[in-house]
Amino acid sequence: MTNSVQANENNSDTLSMHSPNLVDVNVQKIMALFPNCITESEDENGKLKKAVDFDLLRQELSQSLVEGGQERYRLDWPGKRQAILEANSPIAKTLRPARDESVNFDTTENLFIEGDNLEALKLLQESYLGQVKMIYIDPPYNTGNDFVYEDDFSEDTTDFLARSKQLDEEGNRLITNTESNGRFHSDWLTMMYSRLKISKNLLKDDGVCFISINDYEVDNLIKICKEVYGADNVECLIWNKEAEGSSGTLKKTLRFRVIHDYILVCYKNKTQVFFDRVSEPLEGRENEFQTANLAVNESNIKEGHPNWMELTSPNGKKWYKHWKFNNDDIEKLLEDDLIYWGSDGDRQPRLIIPTDHRRKVFSQSIINKGGTTLGRKEFESIMPENVFSFPKSVKLLEHLINITNPKDIVMDFFAGSSTTAHAVMKVNAEQQSNYKFIMVQLDEVIDPNKQKEAYQFCIDNNFKTNISEVSKERIRRAGKKIVEDNQDKDGIENLDIGFRVLKIDSTNMKDVYYTPDSYDQATLANLESHIKEDRSGEDLLFQVMLDWGLPLSLPIEVKSIQGVSVYYVGINSLVACFDTLSTELIDEIARDQPLKFVSSELAIAQDQDKTNIKARFAQLSPDTQVKFI
């Protein structure tokens, strides 16, 4: 009897005959929002079941550090709660445009963000929430010789950072994470956890995040990825870094030459992700192909059909037949070397079927593409030698892009040498696609003693001596080379090889804008403006775009109307003017019926003018949202 009951309980076709367990339903809801807060516990029968880690959930919902907790199944380390706090805390920062460092600033749809990637991810939350199809990152591997971030946003001042020794004398936020550090693994995990949590929000429902890593931290990284994305949404690939002739590494702790690293694949929702098959050569049959009749059987020739033509073989033998294609198509087949004349070159011509050289296959869990040596050669084909250590291969990134088919945005917030941007432009040129990239790279200062070639490269080119300058120059050179190499492609002149440089900086607004209660009346009277004096109208424009959640890649046109600069973003998605407003100027802007209009409090003389401006828009363009900063 017992066995029968158990069988019925395990049969999905039987009715449960009881009301739903609302606790289980609520646990599923919490798991969808906060997968890291789900752990395991035993029920009354000793079976494992899903349970909520309320300590972690409290931390997710708190703006201050929550102490306490009990032992449970999970990955823990000193700083984990701090990482959650940092991921959830706001920052008073903005993105400032740098036109002189950009390429095709007004029209490009690509972005290069310079600064701390945790801050960048926070700033992008409104504009790119659920908009990114593919993320690829190649973070520090925590080998003991590289750097990690020290993050703390409890205060937003340079003084705090200097006081807590998070900034060196040159303003760098990175610290060396040596193996002698008592928090060697913890510091690295804290850095990665907060960034992965925020970046997940940017992914589309069918989005994918690829993470390159080696064996130093792969076990820990898998665990935190499963917390962030959910246990069922993480897979691990093997990457053969010796592909195309790379050299492996003999480690003291191993007795094997290591020729592999890993690529973790994290899905926003695995059930919605379908990778494209890739074109691969048929192993051992690369030189084989199939052919088909090029000539029409005489019994099937219709009267008056025009496709008669004389073809001459490479050896001079002539064939006058009625062909399946018209004369122009035959000429194109000859030009593309798709006509086969037999093994001796004198047989009746046949049509080569080129697709038989290759086949569409699913990508494998072992990736034999784009090894480290190829990555270095690709980089040094456009940049000097030894300027960047171990750049990832364009070919590897092309493969990941091709199987993901991102359609829209590809992001890399550990951009390094910007291999990802190079690969996006190359795929666009070869496939006539229109993928866009967002690169994020810290302006990490180059050590002239340890990175002599990179330091000298920046000096020779009058660049600031930091890694982001190398990264930007690689994109500039790669774009030019891709255009040069694809001159025969239709529409190559329209390829987007530009990028809009945006730099993370403190907010454009003075502190009084955020904390007026801390100033007395005398101080307020001396403040003519709540906007910092060194900020331009374009600086304000990008902070408005961030606050309003507009894509930062929208085209921008600066129009001069009645002698005043007016910014038109995305044609008329947003119109901004931060100079003095007149009734005539408002009337002319309103005639364009923008979706949104923004100006500054300084652009109006009196408070009632603000009311008048809103009334004017309500009359001439009633659908326009009007705001002031």
Image: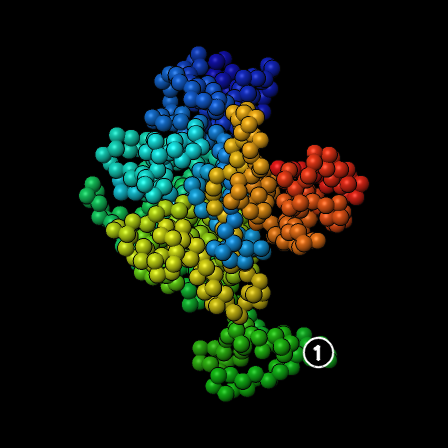
Residue 389 rendering spot, x and y as whole percentages? 31, 52
| Residue nearest the viewer, comparing 106 with 133 | 106
Q: Residue at x 56, y 52 (%)?
A: 109
**For residue 189, what is the image quadrant?**
top left
Instruction: Quarter of the image for the C terminus: give it.
Output: top right
Amino acid identity at mark 1:
His
The answer to whether 204 is drawn above or below residue 480 in the figure is: above
| Residue nearest the viewer, comparing 395 with 605 | 605
The answer to whether 139 is drawn above or below residue 39 in the figure is: below
Q: Is residue 92 visible?
A: yes
**For residue 574, what is the image quadrant?**
top right
Q: Is residue 362 visible?
A: no
Left or right for 233, reference 140: right
Q: Residue at x 74, y 39 (%)?
A: 613
Tell me which colouring the rendered structure shows: rainbow
> What residue would you read off at disc 1?
305
Q: Residue at x 70, y 78 (%)?
A: 305
Left or right for 599, reference 269: right
The answer to whether 411 is drawn above or below residue 225 in the figure is: below
Q: Which residue extends farthest right?
A: 619
Q: Residue at x 61, y 52 (%)?
A: 556
Residue 191 rendering spot, x and y as whole percentages? 38, 35
Left or right for 254, reference 121: left
Residue 294 rendering spot, x and y as whole percentages? 58, 74
Residue 600 rendering spot, x and y as whole percentages? 63, 40
The answer to whether 222 is drawn above or below residue 247 in the figure is: above
Crowd class of label 1 (few under 14; some 14 to 19; many from 20; radius 10 Å): few
| Residue nearest the viewer, comparing 557 with 79 | 557
**Circle 1 — which element?**
loop
Left or right for 297, reference 255: right
The mark total stands at 1
